Image: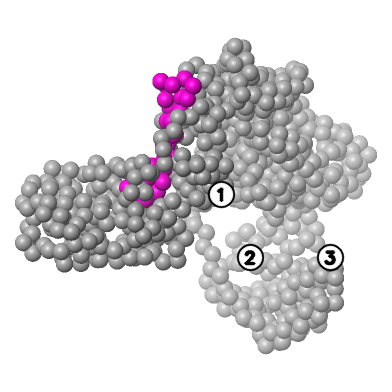
Amino acid sequence: MGGEEAWPDAAAMERVAEAFARGPAQGLLHLVSRELDTPVPAAIAFWREFGRLYLSRFCHGIAPNAAEIAPVPPVDEDEWRAWLERRPPIQGGEYLDIGALAGLWNDLDAQTRAEAAAHAGGPADYLKSLSPVWRLVGRVCFHLAENRKNPDYPFAFLATYASGVSGQGRVKYRPLAEALNEYAGERNKTALLRLLAPVHAAAEKSALARELVDTGALFKPLAWPPSRAYLFLKDAQILDACGVVVRLPDLWRGGHPPRAQVSVRIGETPGRGFGTDALLDFKVERSLDGEPLSDAEWETLMTSAGGLVSIRGRWVEADPEKLAAVLKNWKKAERAAGGGVSFAEAVRMLSGVPAGGGPADADAAAATAEWSGIKAGGWLDATLARLRDPSQLDAASAIPALRAELRPYQKIGVGWLRFMTELRLGACLADDMGLGKTIQVLALLLTRKGERAATEPCLLVAPASLLANWRAEILRFAPSLTFRILHPSDLTPDDWKTVQLDAPKAVAGYDMILTTYGMVARMESLRKIPWDIVALDEAQAIKNPAARQTRAVKELRARQRMALTGTPVENRLGDLWSIFDFLNPGLLGSARQFAQYVKSCARDGGGFGALRALATPYVLRRMKTDKRVIADLPEKTEVKAWCGLAPKQAALYEQTVHELADAVSAAEGMQRRGVVLAYLMRFKQICNHPSHWLRDGGFAEEESGKFQRLRPLAEEIAARQEKALVFTQFQEMTRPLLDFLTSIFRRAGLALHGGTPVRERRRLVDAFQAENGP
């Protein structure tokens, strides 16, 4: 479609040629999107102008809520003739006539409407994808500008509409009054109504817009006082939501004038004391863009009518009543803080979570957020940055007593645990399973022992099944740590009696004491001993705040508290609250306040970001799937094996469905929930094996789809002389599974469940891991 004129840009020529090779319509769309202001030869510029004309008409013709995009009618013959008259020399131009132009218009129309209809974001977003300027064409725009020449009316307002795009790729704005002439006549009435539809929609929601429409002032340039400009500013979001484009002074960053604020700065210097109760300095100031306001400037704001006030030669947004109230509240908080605010309270303030973790007074919270800003001072800002990004901390150096080489992420983890211990902040090490939480804790304890930082032993609380694993890890990686296991399974009857009579004496002189959650609940004496560190392994064990063992664990006295868990939130956010109530009591408020806050977050769709900001400094979580953490770990392969129901299972399942329907119909209120939960358990049992539910002891293979599917899987593993771990949720299924698998592997297997004695568990694990083990 071009002539012989040279291209200023060879790369642009290639792009345009590639676009036209896909078709004339695709080429024209490319010109009015990617090459909107690219220097091109006159022949190409002619076709770009053709595309601009079409797309401008397309923008003006889009109905806001139309189900379909209507075709854009071609221009009349007189305009086509004018186009032909001003065409430059074009290769093949002698064949160009009105029919050819009309045909090309229709092709371009079909292509554009098809692409716009298929675009996920709709026609408006499609236009924006071509070029942001096209999103504005065909829309009314309200402009507000400063007029410094008139001190009484320092703002100017003008309503325009975007008629098209210039040759330089910029939107062409024309006074809205000219639209009345351009769209004059019955034939253009629909187009005019479509153009003004967003304005009329805004008039239904904005008193200012309604007044502009009703008085006809909308079609005139207006001079406004600051109070009028402020009304416009407050309605800007409403206007934008209705489809009116709003243009504000360029000096107003983010489309908003600067705002006077009450500034609060916390933690400029290190706190006094330790832990979440460490007191940090707390300073309240009056500021503008981070710079303090003088008494005279503040007085100017307070005595003004509010809205837009001229300060330092520029317009500032102010609300004297709200500013005064916010300043009063912060000054009250400053006086109440006395010597400072606690570390925990400082982090809460910065996060935006209301005091106590509960829902805040909506009006007071909105005013505080709107007219005040909270910033971390130098020390607190640096401390939080290192807590949130432990790579900024000094990684653990070589630990001679540790018989292992820590991976880089583990060194960072030890450095983070050490930093948290120095600050006496409760720490949750939430690394994914298999990343070595155990060895990181042992490395920390060895470091503290080498520095002689601990005067009391560390208490490690773990599920009974993990005590043997901790013993093995200590002996393997940290044999210089002296330790003792406080559990009847690991002590002689006489030793156990001695421990019960005098627990403080029994733990004295050891670096580390290992016990279980159950023992902490049973032995009140453990809760009276001062510990250096109390660390909970599988800390989700205290997710139920009402459980006896949870209450007992939270009574333990310690200089530092740690939680080790790969699942800090196992089922619900309440799990996180219980762990934090152990680590840093009061940080998330009471259980009731926290539940109310979470409920408000779920209802309003916000607040979770603030909660995350509050909790993040106390949690270190790395995932095995993150290659930045560990790159040489092989990918986990998961293959789902689907199991159908055997005939007997299917019959029993269907029967149970009917029974459930009858039981639910007969139940009322909360009783229905109990019925459903009971039947869910029955369905699980039937899906395992009919005998599991019937308790007839049969467990015939042909009666269970799972058993039938398990056989070929197990036979393949047995043929390769490999080992397999088979898990079940039900202890009563371990014996039938063990008997079934023994018949396939032709050798006895091992079974470990909640009823297995603690002393026996380690032997079973060692036997399974042995090369010739079962």
The boundaries of the magenta stretch are 134-163
Label 1 crowd (10 A; few <14 / some 14-19 / many >=20): few
Earlier-in-chain disc, 2 versus 3: 3
Q: Which residue is mark 1?
A: 204
Q: State left or right for residue 665 relative to residue 224.
A: right
Q: Which mark is residue 282?
A: none
Q: Point out residue 330 in the picture as x, y percentages from the top left corner.
A: 70, 24
Q: State left or right for residue 53 relative to residue 322.
A: left
Q: Point out residue 743 in the picture as x, y percentages from the top left corner.
A: 66, 79
Q: Point out residue 350 in the picture as x, y percentages from the top left corner.
A: 64, 31
Q: Quadrant of residue 299?
A: top right
Residue placed most toward the observer, 295 or 753? 295
Q: Which mark is residue 725?
A: 2
Q: Amino acid at mark 1?
A: Glu
Examine the rendering and report whether any part of residue 561 can be seen.
Answer: no
**Do callouts 1 and 3 mark residues in contact (Cβ within 8 Å)?**
no
> Which residue is painted at 52% across and 27% down in the image?
226
